[in-house]
Amino acid sequence: MSDNEREARRARLAALREGGVDPFPARVGERSSIAEVRQQHDSSSEEALEDAKPRVAIAGRVKALRSFGKLLFMTLVDDGVSLQVSARKQEVSPEVFAFAKQLDVGDFARVEGVVWRTKKGELTVDIRRVEILAKSLRPLPEKWHGLSDVETRYRQRYLDLIANDEAREIAVFRSRVLTALRSFLDGRGFLEVETPVLQPLYGGAAARPFTTYHNTLDQQLYLRISDELYLKRLVIGGLDRVYEIGHNFRNEGISKKHNPEFTMLECYEAYADYRDMMVLTEAMVTEVAERVCGTTKVDFQGEKLDLAGPWPRVTIRDAIAEGTGVDILAAPDLPALQEAVRAQGLHPGEAPTWAVLVDELFSEHVEPRLIQPTFIMDHPVELSPLAKRSAEDPRLVERFEPFVAGMEIGNAFSELNDPDDQRERFTAMETAREQGDDEAHPMDEDFLLALEHGMPPTGGLGIGVDRLVMILADAPNLREVILFPALRRDGGTG
């Protein structure tokens, strides 16, 4: 913004105050929403409006101004709906016309006037009275070019929402997805709950946490990486179907699929297992897609996806074997797996543990190919410290991950409810941490204490809400569907 523009707006602000006008009043007079006015009069003909001369009051932000001497046009926007407003010098007092001409793009105003149609047929409110509701001291992004700088769009999302209709549509769309998710679970008898974001010990996932400090308690705390262990405590306590939609925090990289603060849906159902959770996942995604998109067939970044179930079920062993030629279960330790990878002409990298190398093989050679919805299931126990062992093969656990468009959108288990087995898993994770895996799950004695009181067989599911919205909205990255994504610190917006 130029200094001249800033000074001109400040001068008009001062003039308002000198004239006894409050540029930021606390009250707004009676009004109809612009949507209501349009609903009532959009179908009215020019002749009908001329005969009836309906009078309305509306309010909104001035989005555009066009002055033609004795005629002034402006566009007001209210909750995403716009309407043209006119001021004709011969129809109003000189004071009202002069006041209207002093409005700036970006100002909020309330106008009273008569509804009419221009010669081009555009529905318009002809001003009889106008008042300022809030003075804008900075201009909006230029009308025709909008706001195209990506960094500015994310850092100053309020400008993005004003300038780009698509940004607003995605924000509304995301809210509808959340409503649909809640409706789906509420309709199946799940109870929405809230669990701590500040935790004395993080857990429920493999990730590095953010740490903070509570002065009064003289205690280090962590922003949660998952709400899993607290939700399981509720199942232990007799709440048989629970879910939470909330923010998790992981101290990791940022990419088109990752944001350190993200929204997860987690739900747990007593007397269910991971196969029940597969059915629940298919039904949930299908119903949400139908409610917000009107169909289960959606386009995502050039790919045509069919989200209707049933989805294919593929073991992680078979998926990696198909993608790399490596049988992970035939190479049960890190040296053997590294040799098997080299034998296929691949580079094993610097993975510190067998489990990490398995995960890297899958992420690089399998995940990008999983375009249509697919369940990857039956993971090695080393990858899944909180899942129940398979009765058919104790090397594996009853776990699946749903993949869509080359992205994992969730994680689910038959939850481990044997406290002795859980302790052994935590101990193994401690060893992995000592070997260099800084995302290994810590020992959690308090959770083990809860588990020793008995937890029924339970199925658990986590769905990444941001990624689901990203797919359903056909957005190219997470930052488009998170209103305020994580960004590197900026020196100032000028």
Image: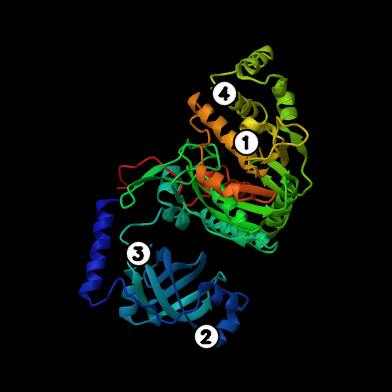
Q: Name the residue under label 2.
A: 53
Q: Type of residue at label 4?
A: Thr
Q: Type of residue at label 3?
A: Asp
Q: Name the residue under label 4.
A: 353
271 w.r.t. 256: above or below: below
Q: Name the residue under label 1.
A: 384
Q: Label 2 vs label 1: CA separation?
A: 70 Å
Label 4 crowd bin: few (<14), some (14–19), many (20+), radius 10 Å? some
Q: Reading the chain from its start, which is encountered first: label 3 or label 2?
A: 2
Q: Nearer the viewer, mark 4 or mark 3?
A: 4
From the viewer's perspective, tell me whether residue 7 is left or right of residue 252. left
Give the secondary structure at mark 2. Answer: loop
* Image quadrant assignment for residue 270: bottom right
Q: Label 4 vs label 2: CA separation?
A: 78 Å
Q: Which residue is drawn at 71% across and 49% down?
A: 277
Q: Type of residue at label 1?
A: Ser
Disc 3, disc 2: CB below 8 Å? Answer: no
Label 3 crowd bin: few (<14), some (14–19), many (20+), radius 10 Å? many
Q: Reading the chain from its start, which is encountered first: label 4 or label 2?
A: 2
Disc 4, disc 2: CB below 8 Å? Answer: no
Give the secondary structure at mark 4. Answer: loop
x and y, in percent, of residue 41 in the image: 58, 78
Give 441 or 155, whichever is nearer the viewer. 441
Q: Mark 3 points at which residue?
A: 104
From the viewer's perspective, tell me whether residue 104 is left or right of residue 180. left
81 w.r.t. 143: above or below: below
